[in-house]
Amino acid sequence: MSRPPLKKQIALPLLFAAVFGLTLYVLHTISGAPLTKVMANPDGALEWTMRFVSIAFWLSVAFAAVRALNELVFLVFRKRKGYEAPGLMRDLFSLVLYVTSLAVILKQHFESLSFGALLSGSALLGIILGLALQDTLGNLFSGISLHADKPFQVGDVLTVGKWTGVVMSITWRAVKIKTFSNHIVLVSNSSIAKESIEVCPRDGQNARIVNFSTVYTHSPVKVIHAVREAIRECDNVLRYMTPVVRIRNLGDSVVEWEVKYWLSDYARHNDTDALVRQRIWYAFRRNGFDFGSPVRTIHMAQAAQQDGEGRTAETLAEILSDVDIFSPLSSDELNTLALNVRGHVFAPGETIIRAGDSGSSMFVVHRGSVDVRVDSNGTPRTIKRLGEGEFFGEMALFTGEPRTANVVAAEETEVLEIGHDAMKGLFETNPDLVEALSHTINERRAGLAANSSTPISEEDTPDGLLFRIKRFFRLD
Ligand code: CMP
């Protein structure tokens, strides 16, 4: 729980100090007695009142001063250590200062007061209080030892007994955790000291394991590659730790797998597990893998005449006829092209094309939209959103150069992938298509040069590019 700002914390004590100070001044003007006398030896009701008003004044000042000092000291702490000091430490710090200030103020006003005698005289009282406050003191001391050991901090994920959640605060009495169902649980410090606890540090390399299965016919190498690639760029998955995909068991009817991945923020592991499963699902769909359900096996049996999405060549030809660049094609050409096209579905945020990779196919957006992203001084920047009927990936396909940008699905997006050989067939009979595409490539190169901080290969003259495409495709 966050503390109120300093201004709010000291406003009231300062207001009281002003009121008591003013009262003291008025009383002093009326009685004419010097303050030193009032503090040492008050005489009469007025001077006794002055003494108590003086105590109240100094207590208010001390209150404001302790709060301000607390803020200052723990501001320095935060700056030096990089994290917020635990509430218990702050409370103890203030408590010590409050008790000291009270002792000094009382001693100033009651010279004869002896704290030594007070402490020894109250030994019996101490025993009685100790017994009454047994649990509270137990919590306090467990809290102090928790702080000395520092097994966890605010923001870590803690499992204690049947509870798991994110640590919200650590006070002198209990640790407050927020469970993943958004419930607040207070676990007393003494039960934490007694129980075994599991801590997943906020910025540690915490791993998670997600299970899935495949049928026996799929190549393990292909499954490992597809799953690893699919989850590599999920939000909250650590990029520098390569996920481990491995066979967990050879079951009766399916191969049982597990993928181990590392998270940046463990507190979001439920969402990240779900995202990882979602990405595995999309990767399976694109690669024609089967999780092993009987229903899916029936679909797989029909896959030979269909694309990855279960569509026939006729349906694909119809879809392609609506795409602008293919409008000059005859229906025979569209049918031939459709035979060589595969549909793939990508999840929102999934990378379809990665800058720098080599590429031997282009894509038409059939459903959804994609963002073309380039690196601009170290941060990814979207330079273009391409929607239904638009295409991408043509630059590497037609020039043989590496991919020039990242292309990321902006929503669930279905793309139609067209390979090198299919395009070659079309170019042979449609020289206009080559020309139209070379124009698009030159325009996009200009867009890239204007938006990217990485050098882009020089823009060709339209004729030069046309020549290079023809040479690459061995036309003429
Ligand atoms: P390619 O280089 O194969 O892979 C990245 C793709 O992003 C690229 O082909 C183009 O299809 C697309 N692309 C690059 N720059 C632009 C741009 N300025 N406008 C639209 N698309 C682009």
Image (cartoon, rainbow, N blue to C red):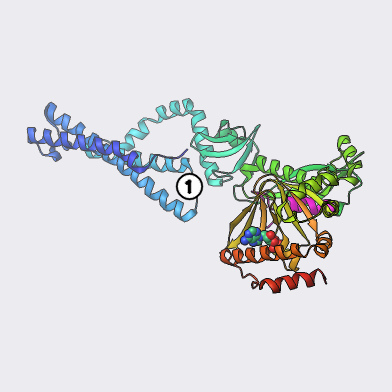
Nearer the observer, 250 or 463? 463
Residue denoted by label 1: 84
Residue sitting nearer the eye, 420 or 73: 420
Which residue is drawn at the image coordinates 51% and 39% (left, top)? 170
Name which residue lies at 73% across and 48% down: 322
Task: Identify whether 140 is placed above or below 465.
Answer: above
Q: Residue 334: within the magenta? A: no
The residue shown at (14%, 32%) is 42
> Looking at the image, in which quadrant does ligand 1 appear?
bottom right
65 or 328, nearer to the observer: 328
Question: In x, y percent, where is residue 394?
Answer: 72, 61
Q: Which residues are magenta?
A: 222-240
Image mark count: 1
> Residue type at mark 1?
Glu
Residue 297, image x, y percentages = 89, 39
- In the picture provided, is 150 more to the left or to the right than 47? right
- Residue 329, horizontal then vertical, whole percent: 79, 55
Question: Horizontal and vertical percent for residue 136?
Answer: 49, 30
- Whether residue 284 is visible here, answered yes or no, is no
Q: Quadrant of the C terminus?
A: bottom right
- Helix, strand or loop at label 1? It is loop
Could you say which quadrant of the image residue 403 lies in? bottom right
Q: Nearer the viewer, residue 26 or 369?
A: 369
Counting other residues with Cα less than 10 Å from the Cα at mark 1, is it few (<14), some (14-19), or many (20 or more)? Answer: few
Residue 192 visible in the picture: yes
Q: Is residue 231 magenta?
A: yes
Q: Is mark 1 within 8 Å of ligand 1?
A: no
**Is residue 91 toward the left or the right of residue 340 in the image?**
left
Would residue 388 be found to the left or right of residue 295 on screen?
left
Residue at 78% across, 42% down: 211
When the figure is inspected, residue 14 is found, relative to residue 286, above or below; the finding is: above
Q: Is residue 244 above or below residue 188?
A: below
